[in-house]
Image (cartoon, rainbow, N blue to C red):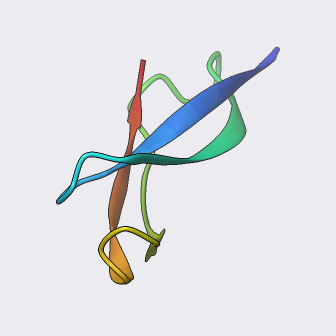
Amino acid sequence: MREIITLQCGECKNRNYTTMKNRKKHQDRLETKKFCPACRRHTAHREVK
């Protein structure tokens, strides 16, 4: 079953994005590079609870 997760900026700690993932197939935390409007540049965003 797919669940909604929140992505948090690694530098300013703002929670900017939400996405969905299948927790049965991928138990580890998702990390992608996305644009952070607060930092005004592309930074690493990690999944948070």
Above-or-below relation of 14 to 43: above
Residue 22: % across, % down: 71, 27
Which residue of the protein is positioned furthest toward the left in this rendering? 11
Question: At x 47% / y 43%, what residue is drawn?
Answer: 7
Indicate the quadrant where residue 48 lies: top left
Question: At x 25% / y 46%, what residue is drawn?
Answer: 13
Which residue of the protein is positioned furthest toward the front in this rendering? 38
Give left or right: position of 43 versus 17.
left
Towards the viewer: 39 or 1: 39
Residue 27: % across, % down: 47, 22
Indicate the quadrant where residue 32 lies: bottom left
Question: At x 37% / y 56%, what residue is drawn?
Answer: 45
Residue 46: % across, % down: 36, 46
Which residue of the protein is positioned furthest toward the right in this rendering? 1
Give left or right: position of 26 versus 30.
right
Above-or-below relation of 36 to 40: above
Quadrant where the image shows the C terminus: top left
Towards the viewer: 42 or 12: 12
Towards the viewer: 31 or 6: 6
Residue 17: % across, % down: 58, 49
Above-or-below relation of 27 to 21: above
Quadrant where the image shows the N terminus: top right
Question: At x 37% / y 81%, what residue is drawn?
Answer: 42
Give left or right: position of 24 versus 29.
right
